[in-house]
Image (spheres, helix red, strand yellow):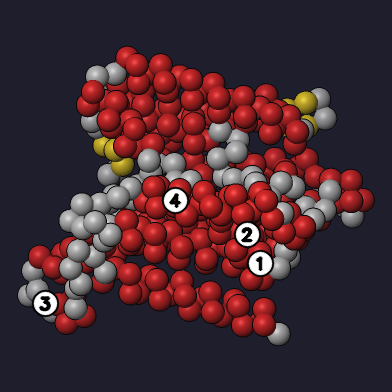
Amino acid sequence: MRRNFIFPALVLAAAAALVFLPFAGMRLISLEVVFHPFSGVEADIFWKMRVPRTLVAFLAGAALSLSGMTFQAIFRNPLATPFTLGVASGAAFGSAVTVLLGATFTVLGISGQSLGALAGALLTIGTVYGLSKTRRGVSTPAMLLAGVAVSFFFSSLILFLQYLSDFTQSFRIVRWLMGGIETVGYGAVLGLLPFVLAGGSAVFLLRGELNLVATGDDIAASRGVDVRKVHTILFLAVSLMVGGVVAVCGPIGFVGLMAPHISRILTGANHRRLAPASALFGGAFLALCDTLARTIIAPAEIPVGIITAVLGGPFFLWLLLGGSSEKAIQ
């Protein structure tokens, strides 16, 4: 009975986050100012900066949460995250290359650094998929090992590029690696939305198969699930979604670890309920973290990746030592 009220509560919490968080900041903006036709600068700040930033944070949080939930089910590992297969490292390498080359162009409002990050993420996805493919299809253990190897490889290349860069370039690389949501206008929202819709749709359509895959490949196959096909579709869809998020926001850690587990505690392990709950909770969670990041030491701003890391470190230890969420997955 308690879980029947959880989903409506999450819907209300997500709606409240989208509606009320844009009003918060260095200065609170009143409702009268927002809708007044001659309110000037404060209305521009609200509609052109705070609203799109909140939308980007919500979309990114929902995508990372869904991705973490999916990888935890596929690998049957409660510590799996959206960056387990090295997408963040590949995207960071692509971003570092554009910084070192001094790329300052934009395409459809998307910076060259973001496009470089997306190219690096796509390169990682293709490499991991190619390395993990066996004669019989895509092997899940091989995929995991390939992702770890590729992640270490690109991390080494990033260190090499930092060594070659000057102080300004090195600072830009390090700052991007912290993760952050800094957007003006709705270009980032429109750039991120197709990735989230495509990847999220794949996860939602395969929620029933995820329930079976999480119990084991043999059991899923005995129930008529084409395990390798499901793994391949989810791997490509979710990795592309993560690549889009990282290209826009940088690597924001721990959201894909914390949000699915908290949602699992609230709704149970059934992915038909867990998937929408994870999306709603993850979106509201990252939007709230981003609001804290831009208000705690205002007028300065903390990268939101630092906020999520501060929260995620203790959560990771609790998860590692407690093991309660691993039982929920199984």
The amino acid pointed to by label 1 is Ile
The disc, 3 or 1, on the residue closer to the chain's N-terminal end is 3
Q: Bin the neighbour count of mark 4 within 10 Å (Cα to Cα): few under 14, some 14-19, many 20 and up.
A: few
Where on the picture, by quarter, is residue 5? bottom right
Residues at circles 1 and 2 in contact by the CB criterion of under 8 Å? yes
User: Alpha carbon of mark 1 to alpha carbon of mark 4: how far?
Assistant: 21 Å
Q: Residue 315 location in percent, x, y?
A: 56, 54
Say which element carries label 4.
helix
Residues at circles 2 and 3 in contact by the CB criterion of under 8 Å? no
User: Alpha carbon of mark 1 to alpha carbon of mark 2: how far?
Assistant: 6 Å
Q: Is residue 19 left or right of residue 218?
A: left
The disc, 1 or 4, on the residue closer to the chain's N-terminal end is 1
Q: Which of the two marks, 3 or 1, is nearer to us in this view? A: 1
- Disc number at residue 34? none
Q: Circle 4 sits on which residue?
A: 310
Q: Which of the two marks, 2 or 3, is nearer to us in this view? A: 2
User: Alpha carbon of mark 2 to alpha carbon of mark 3: how far?
Assistant: 44 Å
Q: Which of the two marks, 4 or 2, is nearer to us in this view? A: 4
Quadrant in which the N terminus is drawn: bottom right
Farthest residue, direction right: 222
The amino acid pointed to by label 2 is His
Q: Nearer the viewer, residue 90 or 77?
A: 77
Residues at circles 1 and 4 in contact by the CB criterion of under 8 Å? no
User: Alpha carbon of mark 3 to alpha carbon of mark 1: how far?
Assistant: 46 Å
The disc, 4 or 2, on the residue closer to the chain's N-terminal end is 2
Q: Circle 1 sits on which residue?
A: 265
- Disc number at residue 37? 3
The residue shown at (45%, 48%) is: 309
Say which element carries label 1.
helix
Q: Which of the two marks, 4 or 3, is nearer to us in this view? A: 4
Quadrant in which the C terminus is drawn: bottom right
